[in-house]
Image (cartoon, rainbow, N blue to C red):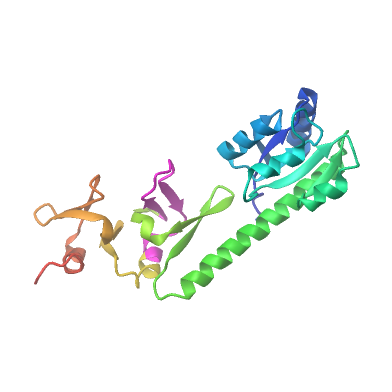
Amino acid sequence: MNKQATIIRAIIVDDELSAHENLRYLLQQYCPTVQIVGEAFHVDEAVILIEETTPELVFLDIEMPYKSGFELFNSFETVSFHTIFVTAYDQHAIRAFSVSAIDYLLKPIAIDLLKSAVEKVALKQEAQHFMERISVFQENNSHPAIRKLSIPYKSDYIIINIEDVLYIEADRMYSIIHIKSDKPQKTFLYAKKLSYFEELLIVNENFCRTHRSWIVNLDYVVSYSKKEHQLSVDTNTQLPVSKSYKEIVERKLGFSS
């Protein structure tokens, strides 16, 4: 099985429209893993664009009106993106690498050098994701209860806190993880059966299987109906409680015998 290529979300910053068009074409033709999520024509516009789109890579010109490309970094306390400088001048190379640039490409852009620079970014991204997964593994194994969960999402991984999980729903050979979040993405599909999570969360006392299709974080239960055999999670969702799980659910919710 071929490994799925990691998508690199990128923006282009250059004051010349022709430079945008040329780089965009080269990336589409020769670097299909690069997804252009925005384009800017000066530094101030680029700062706003980076804050809005959070790219992983910035293709950055140096000689631009008003502000040099180097001044972009003054706007960020922490630089969370990789940079490939693309310029017509070679006298800035030393300074470019002093701000941890991935590469420095001269115009007109050589295709092999562009592909090499993008590959460097991809390798750094893979290393970063690997270290994040190792960190989650180490944190989980240093505590009796699982604290974080690494979820495959698109070509990357989303790291979520277990305490933010509302409930987990069975969907044949998959599970749907529902989380409490102020972000648009509130559900994640995971290629594991519900029994996997039942075993994983067995030491997390606040999680309880309530039905063959549901595991619930009892911390978010706001009401329980003995008559209807269901509980309400976070005021918006009613989930069933089957007879086989009724006793343990009621015990964990504090009902007396």
Q: Which residues are magenta?
A: 173-197
Q: Is residue 165 above or below residue 33?
A: below
Q: Is residue 160 above or below residue 66?
A: below
Q: Pinpoint residue 234: horizontal percent, then vertical percent.
A: 26, 50
The quarter holding residue 40 reads top right
Residue at point 21% right, 68% down?
A: 252
**Left or right side of 81 for 216:** left
Query: Is 175 or 68 nearer to us in this picture?
Result: 68
Q: Nearer the viewer, residue 132 or 67?
A: 67
Query: Outermost residue, top direction?
Result: 17
Identify the residue at horizontal 63%, vertical 42% (top origin).
55
Whether residue 232 is in magenta: the answer is no
In the image, taking residue 137 as reference, residue 113 lies left or right, namely: right
Above or below, comparing residue 4 to residue 32 in the picture:
below
Q: Residue at left 44%, top 59%?
A: 192
* Residue at (39, 64) in percent of width and height: 197
Residue 2 in sight here: no
Please state the horizontal and vertical placement of residue 256, each as a whole percent of the image. Answer: 9, 70
The C terminus - image quarter: bottom left
Q: Quadrant of the N terminus?
A: bottom right
